[in-house]
């Protein structure tokens, strides 16, 4: 369980770390290719869910990109990446357990009412209102990416074209947006709506 995440070539990793720190997106993509399989393997081992493992994989590399200025100072990138992945798994599993517990409490507290169809419509309407409220916490770029990709159903490439940015940048905005929206629901002890669950496929 404590195995570090190994790279194909240590020298390649060192070079890509330095270039990524300087903002080179191509180097970052190569860094991703070198490490993605092992990160996914570790996430899958802890979560036993391919969906969660895929989302964690993306989260990890969003963090790597955000911390890119510090990358050259990391003595053992493989071990650092392993610890980052393991901790993210723990946090995700903890949040899911908390959300499920809160959802169960809310379901037990809700009175039975007649007219399930009307009730479902009210629930959907309320969920939409709360999602809209949560979206107020997003930056303009995060909000637009979320609306285009999650609400309007555009592909990542279509969203990128619409926003005039790269698909990789769209991915970062989407992951941050969904994390913020999920946190909004978890903090309020509310069931997380389907639109804030799921993942963005990394090609």
Image (tube, rainbow, N blue to C red):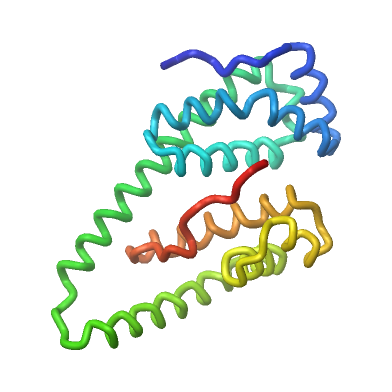
In which quadrant will I find the C terminus? top right
On screen, residue 12 versus residue 48, left or right, reads right
Q: Is residue 74 left or right of residue 186?
A: right
Which image quadrant is residue 36 in? top right
Q: Is residue 195 placed above or below 23 in the rendered structure? A: below
Q: Nearer the viewer, residue 189 or 73?
A: 189
The residue drawn where x is 40% and y is 36% is: 90
The correct choice, above or below, for 15 with respect to 127 in the image is above
Quarter of the view holding residue 76: top right
* Quadrant in which the N terminus is drawn: top left
In the image shown, does 145 or 116 lie closer to the viewer?
Answer: 116
Q: Nearer the viewer, residue 4 or 139?
A: 4
Q: Position of residue 194 (x, y in %)?
A: 43, 63
Q: Residue at x 30, y 47 (%)?
A: 97
Above or below 166: residue 6: above
Q: Is residue 65 left or right of residue 90?
A: right
Height in image: 197 above or below 140? Answer: above
Query: Residue visible at 80% across and 24% down?
Result: 16
| Residue 91 position within the rendered picture, expressed as x and y whole percent measured from the top left | 42, 41
């Amino acid at each position: 369980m404590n195995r570090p995440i190994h790279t194909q070539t240590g020298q390649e990793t060192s070079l890509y770390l330095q270039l990524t720190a300087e903002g080179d997106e191509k180097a970052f993509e190569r860094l991703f290719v070198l490490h993605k399989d092992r990160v996914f393997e570790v996430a899958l081992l802890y979560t036993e869910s391919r969906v969660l493992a895929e989302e964690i994989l993306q989260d990890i590399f969003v963090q790597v990109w955000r911390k890119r200025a510090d990358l050259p100072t990391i003595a053992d990138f493989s071990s650092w990446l392993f610890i980052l992945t393991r901790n993210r798994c723990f946090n995700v599993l903890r949040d899911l357990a908390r959300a499920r517990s809160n959802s169960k409490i809310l379901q037990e507290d809700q009175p039975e009412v007649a007219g399930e169809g009307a009730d479902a419509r009210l629930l959907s309407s309320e969920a939409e209102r709360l999602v809209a409220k949560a979206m107020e916490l997003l930056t303009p770029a995060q909000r637009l990416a979320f609306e285009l990709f999650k609400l309007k159903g555009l592909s990542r490439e279509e969203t990128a074209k619409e926003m005039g940015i790269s698909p990789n940048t769209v991915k970062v905005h989407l992951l941050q947006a969904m994390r913020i929206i999920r946190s909004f629901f978890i903090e309020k002890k509310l069931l997380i709506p389907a639109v804030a669950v799921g993942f963005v496929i990394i090609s």
